[in-house]
Amino acid sequence: MTDITYDRILGSFYAVALGDAMGMPSELWPRARVLNHFGRISEFLPGPDGHFVVDGYVAGQVTDDTQQTIMLAGAIIDGGGKVDAITVARHIVAWADRVGASEGNFLGPSSAKAIAALRDGASPWDTGKTGETNGAAMRIAPIGLLSSPENLKHLVDNVEAACVASHHTDVAISGAALIAGAVSAAVELPKGAKAADHIDDVLEVGYAAASLAMQRGEHVVAASVVARSKLAVSLARTISDETEFLQALYDTVGASVLTTESVPAAVGLMTRAEGDPLRCALLAANLGGDTDTIGAIAGGMCGALSTVTGIPAEFRDKLNDVNELGFEELAAKLRELRSA
């Protein structure tokens, strides 16, 4: 299959993994420590010795960000294109059991709490009521790959169903909807469209989806994901020096596991990189904070904008050599479901 829609779907999958694996070594380290330890990350690196999450990871290895993206794609395919909260919950627990995700520091706080409750028999409609972190946004790209931007209510319905079990709060759903909306709009771009020329177009769809999503889930106290994303875009376009931009993004928008920081940071990085997946992955890796997740979130948008050909073949090959991904099969199935 070589049609442009498939190429954009496949590109999104690969760019999620690219951003995840590139940011893996610096995951959850403060920016100052990243700078002191690495200087500058410019390639896939192994997890540092003694790292509390990724000690022992090899260069190019992905984390739970990519694994949960694959998990969600599988839940969509299992449902024949219908995104069902019960099915997603079942797939989350099955994935966690399969990879031993509940051991050590592998999971984010919201996902860890929800998975434990689901294992104990709790209803998925109860387990995600306090989830405000970025676990929903990090895996949400398949919803954008499945859903058309022509019906934003349906897209947000799908986003909410994907969030229920672990992140059923307005801010988490809003952040995930922003990313899914942008991905969905990017997949619709025609062949030959230059990524840099369509950043604002796809973000407008994302902002509209995020605004709709703020009416969903448990209402919590949190800053606006849309407002903070627009601030990140402004920083990306007004600060000429790359190091100064990353520092300003880290200091002003933030790079923690909170949806209100990591989603806007990802939007800023995607804007700065002009939709280039490799450039964006490197920016994320050097940012500090939740580097792998921010890289994965931004990557999902960049890959859909650039198509799979925007990711150098040697990086795709390395990702496949190190990990079991199966992106081509997933992309083909989501391509069929998007057209259905």
Image (cartoon, helix red, strand yellow):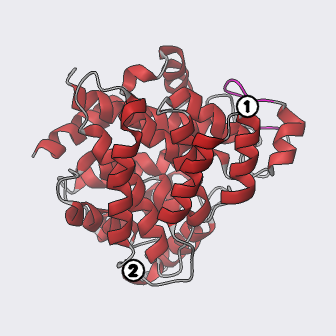
- Tell me the amino acid under the disc marked 2: Gly
Q: Is residue 45 magenta?
A: yes
Mark sitting earlier along the chain (1/2): 1
Give the vertical position of 340 relative to 162 (above or below).
above
Q: Check disc 1 and give the amino acid type.
A: Pro
Q: Residue furthest left?
A: 340
Residue ID at (32%, 40%):
186
Direction from residue 152 to residue 164 in the image, left or right = right
Q: Main secondary structure of the magenta part?
A: loop
Q: Which residue is mark 1?
A: 46
Q: Residue lying furthest right in this view?
A: 36
**Rendered image quadrant of residue 62:** top right
Residue drawn where x is 66% and y is 46% of the image: 291
Q: Which residue is mark 2?
A: 217
Q: Position of residue 18 (x, y in %)?
A: 54, 33
Graded by Cα atoms within 10 Å as few (under 14), some (14 to 19) or many (20 or more), the crowding at tag 1 reads some
Which callout, 1 or 2, points to the residue nearer the camera? 2
The tag on residue 253 is none
In terms of image quadrants, where is residue 89?
bottom left
| Circle 2 SS class | loop
User: Where is residue 229 shown, x and y percent of the image?
Assistant: 52, 57
